[in-house]
């Protein structure tokens, strides 16, 4: 479940990646050329396609890999088949598209296509300790150890850092604790308020960036707000939905973030931790300068104190709710924002074809799993004591690729990985999402893409092998990618 970079503390910072030159048509490797003659959909994706056909779905979202180089011809072919191209990368030979269900087989049959995956959603592992009804650990015969605290030693029964030698290594080589290394965490989003994830051992901010990698249009992600309401503040106020809001005069886009849209997740809909799930937070967006205001305190006033900037720009989180320092729990929730302008709405189908809209994202965690993983990999001074992760000196980039109840989508796992490696320049990526299809052939789009990222950018990707087994065919994709380091 947590293939969490136990060798990371020994990694020096790498130089900036030098991607190989982008050619007009870089051929596949011999192994890829051999695989390209096989069924480019595979039995798993054919089953997904059959399910879509049985539900009479007019279109499906697909991920496509081709030979590295220009994807222009492939994108044109998608359009000819009646589809719409979403994200793509020429260098990596990757295209995401929404195509008519009946045209998927034709798309897979193109000679330039290496592999085709249908988009699907994968379940998020539960990081909760597993114990038997009598309170004894299922992993052994002893009683579960007492809860850790500030006096817990660096070598402890809660983290595998001692068993893998990371604790002894960093004790002998204090400056080789991951400093200078950036780790990408593809998961549910890392908690920006966790005390052990604030600073590295050298005092740098632990979280280097925080990104929401889900899709605004096709994912059921309630934190992506379509800013579809145009409002004009005059005389210092405007009215929407029967509510009067205060704002500086001017034209804006406006939307409401309802906390109850996260009810089916671990958050149980209570974003500001006030004991209910009925709050609605107004969000104001000025497109001319990408200024975003969030009414997190519910006073219906958009002043200077309500301005929230993307974490990449500000390096800080805003908060929902007020924390009580006298309690042992955090009553507030950190969040950041992002914006995407002119997003194509066509994948929704129907009357959305040819239309676009601006979106603002409220960047909050969708679960606890990413923070659990980030602590194992890079936590610094857990519980305020000597207990740390494998690389307490490393920084992290949080890529939230998982939704609030259903799980993590195929293309978020693909495009979040691309963003982490290509745009965020991480050195290592941890992907601890168990339960992905146990294909064991390394022949789907995600596996091909991860191999190419490793080859072209010099990054190392570490993936969990899943929580199944032992047994045949129980190592799950994408741990079966040829060059991904699988931990099980």
Image (cartoon, grey):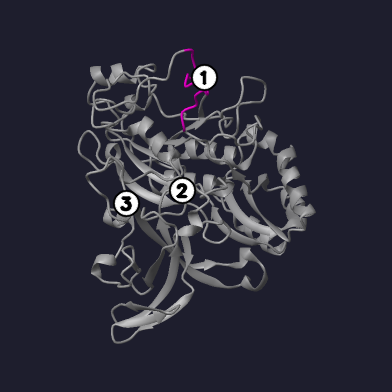
Question: For the stretch drawn in magenta, what is the main secondary structure?
Answer: loop
Q: Where residue 194 sits in the image (x, y, percent)?
A: 31, 41
The one nearer the camera, 263 or 406, is 263
The disc, 3 or 2, on the residue closer to the chain's N-terminal end is 3
**Which residue in the rendered view is the most extreme toward the front?**
134
Residue for badge 1: 138
Residue 207, compared with residue 149, is above or below; it is below
**Which residue in the rendered view is the most extreme toward the top?**
141
The one nearer the camera, 341 or 79, is 341
The span shown in magenta is 128-141
Residue visible at 36% across and 33% down? 375
Can residue 341 be seen by looking at this rendering? no
- Closer to viewer: mark 1 or mark 2: 1
SS under mark 2:
loop
Can residue 160 be seen by looking at this rendering? yes
Mark 1 and mark 2 residues within 8 Å of each other at the beta carbon: no
* Left or right of residue 229, residue 163 in this image: left
The disc, 1 or 2, on the residue closer to the chain's N-terminal end is 1
Residue for badge 2: 366
Asked if the magenta segment contains residue 261, the reply would be no
The one nearer the camera, 263 or 339, is 263
Image-quadrant location for residue 47: top right
Residue visible at 48% across and 58% down? 260
Q: Where residue 276 sits in the image (x, y, percent)?
A: 42, 56
Q: Where residue 477 sits in the image (x, y, percent)?
A: 60, 34
Q: Where residue 317 sits in the image (x, y, percent)?
A: 30, 53
SS under mark 1:
loop
Q: Give the Cα distance between marks 1 and 3.
A: 34 Å
Residue for badge 3: 332
Residue 311, compared with residue 151, is above or below; it is below
């Amino acid at each position: 479940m947590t293939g969490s970079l136990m060798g990371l503390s020994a990694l020096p910072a790498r130089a900036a990646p030098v991607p190989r030159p982008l050619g007009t048509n870089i051929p596949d490797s011999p192994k890829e050329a051999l695989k390209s003659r096989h069924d480019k959909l595979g039995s798993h994706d054919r089953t997904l396609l059959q399910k879509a056909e049985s539900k009479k779905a007019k279109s499906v979202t697909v991920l496509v890999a081709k030979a590295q180089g220009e994807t222009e011809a492939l994108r044109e072919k998608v359009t000819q088949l009646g589809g719409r191209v979403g994200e793509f990368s020429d260098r990596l030979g990757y295209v995401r598209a929404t195509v008519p269900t009946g045209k998927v087989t034709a798309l897979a049959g193109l000679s330039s296509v290496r592999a085709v995956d249908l988009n699907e959603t994968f379940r998020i592992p539960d990081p909760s300790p597993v114990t038997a009804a009598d309170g004894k650990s299922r992993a052994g015969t002893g009683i579960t150890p007492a809860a850790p605290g500030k006096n817990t030693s660096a070598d402890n029964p809660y983290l595998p850092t001692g068993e893998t030698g990371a604790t002894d290594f960093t004790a002998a080589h204090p400056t080789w604790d991951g400093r200078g290394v950036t780790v990408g965490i593809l998961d549910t989003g890392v908690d920006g308020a966790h005390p052990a994830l604030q600073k590295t051992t050298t005092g740098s901010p632990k979280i280097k960036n925080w990104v929401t990698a889900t899709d605004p249009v096709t994912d059921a992600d309630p934190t992506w707000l379509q800013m579809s309401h145009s409002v004009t503040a005059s005389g210092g106020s405007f009215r929407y939905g029967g509510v009067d809001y205060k704002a500086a005069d001017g034209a804006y886009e406006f939307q409401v973030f309802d906390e109850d849209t996260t009810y089916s997740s671990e958050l149980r809909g209570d974003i500001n931790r006030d004991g209910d799930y009925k709050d609605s937070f107004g969000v104001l967006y000025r497109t001319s300068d990408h200024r975003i205001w969030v009414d997190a305190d519910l006073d219906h006033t958009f002043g200077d104190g309500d301005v929230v900037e993307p974490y990449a720009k500000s390096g800080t989180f805003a908060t929902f709710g007020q924390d009580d320092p006298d309690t042992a729990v955090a009553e507030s929730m950190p969040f950041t924002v992002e914006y995407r302008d002119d997003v194509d709405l066509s994948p929704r189908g129907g009357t959305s074809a040819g239309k676009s809209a601006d979106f603002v994202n409220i960047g909050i965690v969708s679960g606890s799993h990413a923070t659990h993983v980030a602590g194992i990999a890079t936590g610094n001074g857990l519980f305020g004591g000597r207990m740390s992760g494998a690389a307490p000196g490393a920084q992290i980039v949080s890529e939230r690729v998982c939704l609030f109840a259903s799980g993590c989508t195929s293309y978020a796992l693909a495009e979040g990985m691309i963003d982490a490696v290509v745009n965020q320049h991480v050195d290592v990526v941890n992907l601890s999402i168990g339960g992905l299809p146990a294909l064991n052939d390394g022949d789907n789009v995600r596996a091909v893409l991860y191999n190419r990222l490793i080859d072209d950018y010099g990054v190392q990707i570490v993936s969990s092998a899943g929580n199944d087994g032992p047994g045949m065919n129980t190592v799950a994709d994408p741990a079966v990618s040829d060059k991904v380091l699988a931990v099980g």
